[in-house]
Image (cartoon, helix red, strand yellow):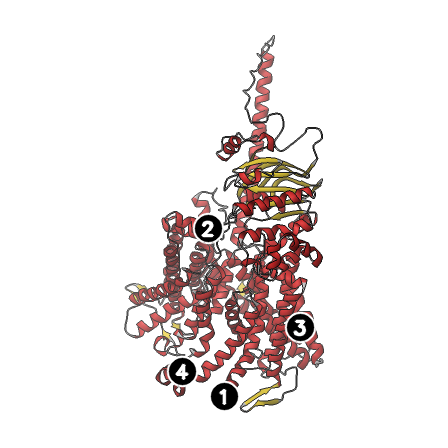
Amino acid sequence: MQFFSITISGAVSGAIYALLAIGLVLSHSTSRIFNFGHAATAFAAAYLYHQFHVALGWNKWLTLLVIVALFAPLMGWAWDRLVFRRLADAEESTKIVAGVGVLIVVPAFVLLVCAILRDALGIPFQDVAEVYQVPGVLPAQQHQIAAGLVLSNNQLVALGASVLLFVTMWAFLRFTPLGLHMRTAVDSPVLARLRGINTGRVSTLSWVISFFLAAVAGVLAAPFPGPFGLVNDNYTLALFVATTAAVVAGLRSVPLAFLAGLLIGAVRNIVVAYVNADHLGAFGAWAAKVYGLTASVPYAVLFIALILLGHDRRRRKAGTAATAAKPSPDYRDDLSPFKKALPWIIKSAVVLVPALFLANGIWRQLFIYGFALGIILLSFTIVTGLGGMVSLAQGAFATAAGLTVGLLLANGWHYVPATVVGVLVAAALGALTALPALRLSGLSLTFATLALALLATNVLFKMEWFSNGTAGWSVPRPRFGPIDLADDRVLLIVVFLVVLLLVRMANNLTDSAAGRAMIAVRTAEPAASASAVSPPVTKLLIFVISAAVAGLGGVLAVTVYGTILNTANPPQATFLWLAIVVIVGVRSPGGAIEAGIISAVLPWIMAHGFDLGPISWGGTSNDLIPQVLFGLGAIQLAAQPNGLLATQSMAARHRRDRKRAKLAAQAAAQTVAQAAAQAAAQAAAQAPAQAAPPASPEPAIEVGEPAAPVGSFPAAGRSPGLLELHGVHAAYGEVEVLHGIDLTVREGAILALLGANGSGKTTLCATIAGLVPVTSGRIVFDGEDITALDTLRRVERGLVLVPESRGVFPSITVDENLSIWLPSKADRAKVYEQFESLARRAGQPAGNLSGGEQQMLSLAPFLVRRPRLLISDEPSLGLAQLVTAEIMAAFQRLQQEGTTVVLVEEKARDVLTVADQVGALQTGHLRWVSERADVDEQRVAAAYLGMSAVVH
């Protein structure tokens, strides 16, 4: 019974973790953004519930309704509209920092507003430091459930409400159209848009529900002062535990997330109760003495779950991008080396001159610490800016190096060898952290580094022999002959020289063979492997170098103030560091140093003010204002995802380009004027004028069909074009893929567009469907210019794309796939009459179908509810010949019913049997379009081999 009682009481905390985990799964699965600020919403809801109900005396049910059903959903809607929706295509680091912005700004803003209202208007809001016990929604009362099992009303409400909400969410997702749309957005947001689902509305709904669940979790958790209460840090730690449950669920499954949350809470209680000498003998006695070991079980589970479950088994589909975050353009590549360095020279002088000659000891140490912190942040430039991996373990590397130096100095070592060993220890931890990077990527890797950082902080750094307990280690400044680092000015110069050396090394690393290998692995890992670059070795090198740099920065940071504690640089601090360096510019080594100076100096200015003669400010004692400003800065990434430095460089480059263009235009006009004047003078001097000989005609170029421009069919009796492309250019970033496509598709015809792999077929399909924006040119559908319309609006007009590699949602059933386009059961019955194999497997997940059955499923809805224009990308990919013939017959049935069809194929044989028109694409150019009767095998082969002339 004791075991049962411990398990149930642990499940109470697990119920809170489960609700948080469900919200994390919902928001991430539909937006691809992990909200690290999720727990901040829970704290804000708990805090406001207490203030309104207890301090202001509101009715508890009214308060609950306002907080949970109004405040939280509105906040979810606002965050989605203002921040998260704009970051859909941003880099992972930018998305994480936006979540960190929520983590910082929401609690600080709520506390700040309540404090202002209390001080300015006398509203009796309570100080959270004075609140120990928050009342629950039911009166405090104990219930004996069974022998040895006593639960309070608060515990029963937490368990019951979490189960009820889970069942409600499961039923909503399983049985409602909106729930189905949310599940399709989890499977494939792009395909969902192609099927007419408003993924923006789905994303907003998921954020609203996510914030609602966080608010409920906060109100339910507040009555438990130990693990939760009204302490913001407790909710942040709860977020880390809930993250474990979400990862176990693959960030996709709501039921698994809920069960994992309950189990983690129960297992945590069981470990605390049974890992001791009474139950596990000597091992239990040792484990009980290791402070933080039992409490860190969720973090170990998180790491193990990531290794076992987090491997990305998805393979790249043809025609999809193989790139991760692409390097941003160098907007200063037109400047000379001196002009590139000039801004940093000026900034360095602005810092060094006052620090050396004008500042007092406090300010001078702040600048030294800022440079040391800049070195730590420089490690983010290497691992994230260059390597494209987001690590949350940089603070742990810095602390490990500092503790190692303190330990060795206490045992008689000299400062220099102790520093070398400290840096090596940090590098070794970096190599250990890199092991998950060999298997994981993206957000999974970020979670793995967070788990290791939490384990190091809660276990390794709490070991008495390593950290000297709560007293920490003393790190006195050394003396090297006449160079005495005890002098702040000397230490400032030495640290600044180290900064210059490391920045130079970081810049050289980018241009070195190792740096190019890092960029290659970051941009396209499969291509890098094919080019004899080893991704595992490269990732290992990135982590080792970044960890060593962070370790050196950590040693210099503790040298400034002379002591190192085991609580230094917790994971929460790493969140802040990542935020500030990304805000400034994570890809710039100089930007990392600038971010370090800002991080060290700005809090001091906010707290103590400044005095610059005629300009002075006394500062503010309210530490919430800097947090709000800092959080808002992180949120600004929605508008400036590349950071402030890149934005400034881009604006300066545009100004220079406009100036050059203006000067070039003036020079050209002057040249034309001079040439005209000279021609007039020569004409006046020659009398009589001699007739110029007739110009010889240019040789004609045979292009196959000179009588008509490509894609047009002017002959009498031809149907007008349903789809028209006029000079369409399209690009991925700065890489143009389509180069001026002109095409007219006759209504009621089947057009086959052929081309080899890499010819631009998939990009053309995506551009017509609205997935890839048109950089120039126009797309006209049924007489309407749809160039500016999004995918959803094009689907509403009857333009549908079946994408490459099967247009089905694999995790939902066959019948649910059909119901997205065919909500009527009668319509779905018509599909089953035509495709008996689909009828037999109507209740099975579509991912379990064969390739041919999946292709049938992707086309079948349109045979019943026919679009105006159907585009199918690679319909025969991976199919047997008999299945391909059946698919082609389906296209012919569509045509007979009045649907215009565009088949985009690499293999010509199959589509030529059904096509009325045939066109050839090559390297983003449309080579020709002709009637099927005018196309033979030799012409098709010539187009594939690039032997046909470009006609535009």
Q: Residue at x 56, y 54 (%)?
A: 89
| Image marks 3 and 1: residues in contact by CB distance under 8 Å | no
Residue 683, x across and y down, in percent: 59, 14
Cα distance between the residues tagged 4 and 3: 40 Å
N-terminal label among 2 and 4? 4
N-terminal label among 3 and 1? 1
Q: Which mark is residue 2?
A: 1
Classify 10 Å Cα crowding around label 1: few (below 14), some (14-19), many (20 and above): few
Kindly identify the amino acid type of the residue bearing the numbered disc 1.
Gln
Q: Which is in the foreground here, disc 4 or disc 1?
A: 1
Judge by depth and name the residue closer to the eye, 861 or 225. 861
Kindly identify the amino acid type of the residue bearing the numbered disc 3.
Val
Q: Is residue 15 left or right of residue 463?
A: right
Cα distance between the residues tagged 2 and 3: 43 Å
Q: Residue at x 62, y 41 (%)?
A: 902
* Residue corresponding to mark 2: 523
Residue 115, x across and y down, in percent: 63, 74
Kindly identify the amino acid type of the residue bearing the numbered disc 4.
Ala
The quadrant of the image that shows the C terminus is top right
| Image marks 4 and 1: residues in contact by CB distance under 8 Å | no
| Image marks 4 and 3: residues in contact by CB distance under 8 Å | no
Name above or below for residue 380 compared with residue 895. Answer: below
Q: Which mark is residue 900?
A: none
| Image marks 2 and 3: residues in contact by CB distance under 8 Å | no
Q: Is residue 647 left or right of residue 426?
A: right
Q: Which mark is residue 288?
A: 4
Element class at badge 4: helix
* Residue corresponding to mark 3: 68
